[in-house]
Image (tube, helix red, strand yellow):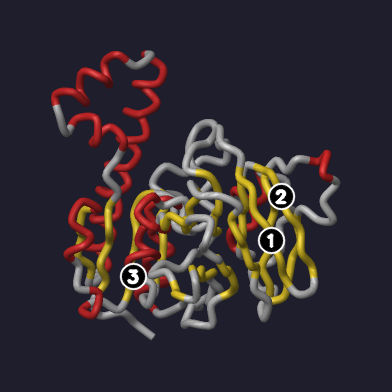
Amino acid sequence: MTFKNIVCITKVTTYDRYMMSEKGRKTFLQLPLLRQETIRESHRNQKDFETMLAVIVRELDLPMMFVSEKIMDKIDVRKHDLVMTCGGDGMFLQAAQRFEQSLLIGCNSDRSEDPKKGSVGALTFIHKGNLQQSLLKLKMGEFHIEAWRRLYALVNGRKLSFLAVNDIFFGPTEPDMTCSFTLSFRQKKESFSSSGLIVATGTGSTAWYHNAGGTPFSKDLNGFGFIVREPNLKRTPAFVSQIISDDSELVIEPHRDGYFVSCDSRQETRHYVNVTDVVRIGLSKEKP
C-alpha cells in the first residue's frame, strides 16, 4: 500500500500563541527567564523539525501538503489517504478527534528521553532520529497499520460526538469541588465521594490513568480500565479501580449538578451533565 495524498498538520507552538497578540507578548516577557528559554527552545525544535521534514519530503518526492493547526478544520479529509501530525501527543489527539475515520501517524518534534526536557511521545512514533528512515518506509509501503480501540460515552442514551483514544474523564467543573456519584458495572455498584473518574483504553493506560495510580495494560487487551481519583477511603469502597471486558459498560449516576465528561483532556469535547443524567462509557466497535 502506498499513499497518494498525505496531509501534514503542523503544531502552533506555545511561543507562537504568546506572539499572536500584544497582550500575549507582554505576558511572555513577564515570565521567568528560564521558562521563556524553555518555550523558545521548544519552538526552535518544532521549526527545525518542520524544515527537516519538508526537505526529506522533497527528496523522496512524497505527495504531502502542509497545513497549520490553525486551519485544520478546513481540511477535507476525503481528499487525503493519510493524516500526519507534526508536534506531540496533544497534536496527535487533536487530529484523532477531528479525523476519527482516517489513518493517522504522528511525529514528535520535541522528543526527549527525559520528560523534564521535552516530550516522551507515547503516541507519536516518528522523531528527528528516525525521520528519514520512517518516511522512506512510508514511501516504500513498508509499514503496518495498528487498530487502536477507542472509548465512547452516552448521556441518557445519546452518543456523544467524540471518541477517546486515551481516556474519558468524568468529574467536577471546578478542581476543588467534590465529585459524588454512583458507579456500576456488571453486578457491582458503589457510591463515591472523590475528585472524579478516569476511564482508559490500553493505549491511554500509560498516561493519566497510570499517573493517577492505575496499572498499565496492553492496548491489545479486549477491555478497558477505570480508576476513581482520590476517593474518600473512610467510606471503605468495595472497589476504586478495575479492568473490565470490552462487552461491559460503566454506568455513572451523578449525585448533583456541576459535572462534565470529556475525551482525551480536550476542552472542545466537554459535555456538561446534571443530577438527572445517566452516563454510560464503553469500548467502541466503530472502525478504530
Q: For residue 183, which numbered disc appears in the image?
A: 1
Q: Residue at x 21, y 18 (%)?
A: 26
Question: Are circles 3 and 1 on residues that touch, CB within 8 Å?
Answer: no
Instruction: Judge by depth and name the residue closer to the eye, 231 or 67.
Output: 231
For numbered disc 3, what is the local secondary structure?
A: loop
Residue 159 location (% of width, % of height): 45, 74
Q: What is the C-alpha distance between the residues marked 3 and 2?
A: 35 Å
Placement of 21 over or under 196, stated as above or below: above
Percent from the top left, x then y, of residue 130?
46, 56
Q: Image height check: is 210 above or below 233? A: below
CA separation in Å, label 3 and label 1: 31 Å
Which structural element holds mark 2? strand
Residue 101: horizontal and vertical position, in percent? 37, 77
- The residue singled out by tag 2 in the image is 192
Please name the amino acid that badge 2 sits on. Answer: Phe
Q: Crowding near pointer 2: few (<14 within 10 Å), some, many (20+)? A: many
- For the point 51% across and 63% down, the residue is 277
Q: Residue at label 3? A: 99
Q: Residue furthest left?
A: 22
Dot 3 or dot 1: first in sequence order is 3
> What's the residue type where badge 1 is placed?
Leu
